[in-house]
Amino acid sequence: MDQLFFMNICSQTMDLNLMNRLMLLISHEKRRYIKALKFDISKKLSLFSELILRYEICNKLKINNSEIVFWKNKYGKAYLKGYPLQFNISHTKNAIVVAFSNNQIGIDIEKLDKKKREIDIAKRFFTSNEYNFVMKSNTDIHQRFYEIWTKKESYTKYLGKGFSIPLRTFDVTDGSIKENFSTFKVNGYIISVCKKNTNPIDSCYLNEYDIWYLAKRLQQ
């Protein structure tokens, strides 16, 4: 069964001592990356998503945290060395999603933000069919915009190529790929998952305090 973890972050700030203790559970490369981030919330999102990822890899594969080795393809997508388990991470504002599957998978999350200039963005990056899908309703334009946007991002991540693929070169409303998407709304966020298999997605909802349990398990 495919699985998705969703976490809401309670606070924008992070205690330095806590961060340093949790950072011992991740790789040196990831520590350097996180320390270079400017804002506490960015550090928390990156660190917590990494801990969720490592916890579930250990749980699924019955291995120790120290045995986890990540590689990246030429587009920067991370994968697990030596195991077929696939995963993908996305975070935005104060929320994280991490998805797992035995097959290719891509995920994206966005906060519903009515202040963003959706129409201008849609004109620039959406196909005509996608743009028409957004504009044909006067009541939920914002949600429709984020549905298309998260589908497009999850698709590029599913392929493992990210934004090296121009967003207007594919259409997520097209019959050849639209069946690969699942989209849902959680706590004011829109989440889209892209995968080819028909396995159901088991969702697990975490809060910021659950990170202590995950960290304790990773130390074992």
Image (tube, grey):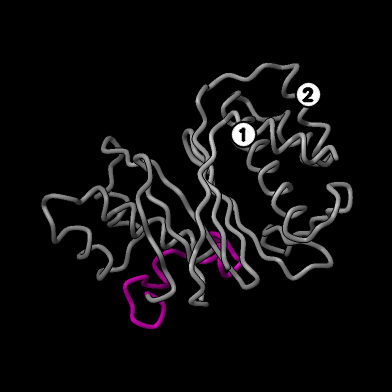
| Disc number for residue 20 | 2
The residue located at (56%, 67%) in the rendering is 158
Q: Rounded to the nearest whole Å, what is the CA distance between mark 2 and mark 1?
A: 18 Å
Residue 114 among magenta residues: no
Residue 51: percent from left, percent from top: 70, 41
For residue 79, side relative to residue 159 (left or right): right
Residue extending farthest to the left is 138
Q: Can you say whether 218 is above or below 197 in the image? A: above
User: If the image is split into quadrants, where does the C terminus sit?
Assistant: top right
Instruction: Specify the amino acid type for callout 1.
Output: Asp
User: Does the segment drawn in magenta span residue 172?
Assistant: yes
Please indicate whether residue 154 sits to the left or right of residue 89 in the image: left
Q: Give, as a single range, the part of the protein colored magenta.
A: 157-178
Disc 2 secondary structure class = helix
Q: Left or right of 108: which side holds 129? A: left
Can you give x and y, in whole percent of width and height, for residue 115 in the image? Answer: 28, 35
Quick one: SS at disc 1?
A: helix
Q: Which residue is mark 1?
A: 210
Q: Position of residue 74 (x, y in %)?
A: 72, 64
Location of residue 217 with respect to 157 vertically, above or below: above
